[in-house]
Image: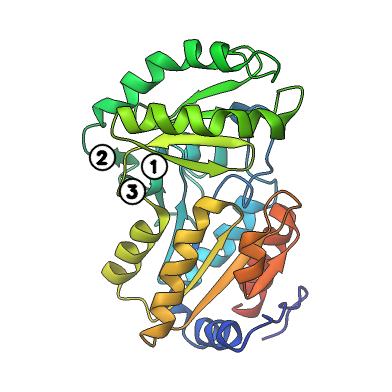
């Protein structure tokens, strides 16, 4: 098997073992990837995010070699499908998108989304956000106009501070008020790259990935992410490895978040690096 894109070597023994297991039996392996910051570059307006131009072609080459390919995201599943351009792509006929941290599931076979009813606290918190932002905003550039409220299909709501005059100061100023708001409505706050997301408890990428991998019967797993919300998925892979199921942890690196890089077996240069990794895996398995 020749490769025009040499595979990078994981920095850890566990990562090297995980990659070896994936290459030895790809038909028994699951590859799961985050969307924003991993397949798509982070942009000031999250509604303008789109998959890296090379992402879909690379994934379409790799997917037929695997037991399963999944995109695991905090976005609504149908939004990730649309922004990713995943529907109707040859090679991605069995792709699964797990949206809202696994609460929603879209699969290419049916082309439909399945999900339970939304948590009522999300809508209640969303209704209070404009007034809260304007109240906190004095001196921080975090008014409802400067901060961007992202509705996530009624299942979560996020406040982005990237547009504020001082994004980091705005982020810090909003932490405590948003935690209080979330607590009143039975929600939790998930911090990310200049974003604070309010969502129901008990939903995270670790639980979603664990359930998906166990149901698939996989014998190896690779997970790629970029943000704090991906730490739970990293922990799930580490637990699998402790149980004897090989795995690889990949960080889509950035200067904004270093926690994942510290725990990753392999760090690549943002979405372009993830595309390069997926391409090299497809090359190695061709």
178 vs 229: above or below: above
Q: Secondary structure at mark 2?
A: loop
Q: Nearer the viewer, mark 1 or mark 2?
A: 1
Mark 3 or mark 1: whose residue is earlier in sequence: 1
Horizontal side of residue 274 vs 33, given as left or right: right
Q: Which residue lies under the disc numbered 2? A: 115
| Residue under the point 68% across and 58% down | 258
Residue at (64%, 45%) from the top-left corner?
A: 40
**Circles 1 and 2 in contact, beta carbons < 8 Å:** yes
Q: Name the spot of residue 136 as percent of width and height, x first.
A: 57, 17
Task: Name the foreground residue: 171 vs 282.
Answer: 171
Q: What residue did someone put label 1 on? A: 100
Kindly report the distance in space between the C-alpha atoms of the residues bearing marks 2 and 3: 13 Å
- The reply to whether dot 3 and dot 1 touch (C-beta < 8 Å) is yes
Category of crowding for the residue at label 1, using alpha-carbon neighbours closer than 10 angstroms: few (below 14), some (14–19), many (at least 20): many
Indicate the position of residue 151 as horizontal and vertical percent values: 45, 24
Residue carrying label 3: 203
Compute the Cα span from label 3 to label 1.
Answer: 8 Å
Quick one: which residue is furthest to the left in this view?
117
User: Residue 245: in sight, yes or no?
Assistant: no
Tell me the number on the disc at residue 220: none
């Amino acid at each position: 098997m020749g490769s025009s894109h040499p595979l990078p070597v994981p920095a850890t023994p566990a990562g090297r073992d995980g990659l070896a297991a994936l290459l030895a039996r790809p038909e028994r392996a699951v590859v799961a990837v985050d969307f924003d910051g991993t397949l798509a570059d982070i942009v000031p307006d999250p509604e303008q995010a789109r998959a890296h131009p090379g992402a879909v072609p690379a994934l379409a080459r790799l997917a037929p070699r695997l037991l399963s390919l999944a995109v695991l995201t905090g976005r609504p599943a149908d939004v990730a499908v649309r922004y990713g351009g995943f529907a109707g792509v040859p090679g991605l006929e069995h792709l699964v998108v797990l949206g809202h941290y696994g609460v929603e599931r879209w699969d290419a076979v049916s082309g439909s989304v399945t999900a339970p009813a939304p948590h009522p606290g999300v809508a209640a918190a969303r209704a209070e956000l404009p007034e809260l932002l304007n109240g906190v905003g004095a001196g921080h550039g975090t008014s409802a106009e400067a901060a961007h409220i992202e509705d996530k299909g009624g299942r979560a709501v996020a406040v982005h501070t990237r547009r504020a005059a001082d994004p980091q100061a705005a982020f810090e100023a909003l932490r405590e008020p948003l935690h209080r708001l979330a607590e009143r409505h039975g929600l939790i706050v998930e911090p990310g790259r200049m974003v604070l997301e309010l969502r129901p408890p008990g939903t995270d990428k670790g639980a979603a990935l664990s359930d998906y991998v166990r149901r698939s019967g996989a014998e190896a797993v690779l997970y790629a992410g970029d943000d704090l919300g991906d730490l739970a998925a990293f922990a799930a892979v580490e637990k699998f490895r402790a149980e004897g199921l090989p795995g690889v942890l990949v960080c889509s690196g950035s200067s904004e978040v270093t926690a994942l890089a510290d725990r990753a077996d392999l760090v690549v240069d943002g979405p372009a690096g993830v595309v390069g990794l997926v391409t090299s895996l497809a090359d190695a398995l061709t």
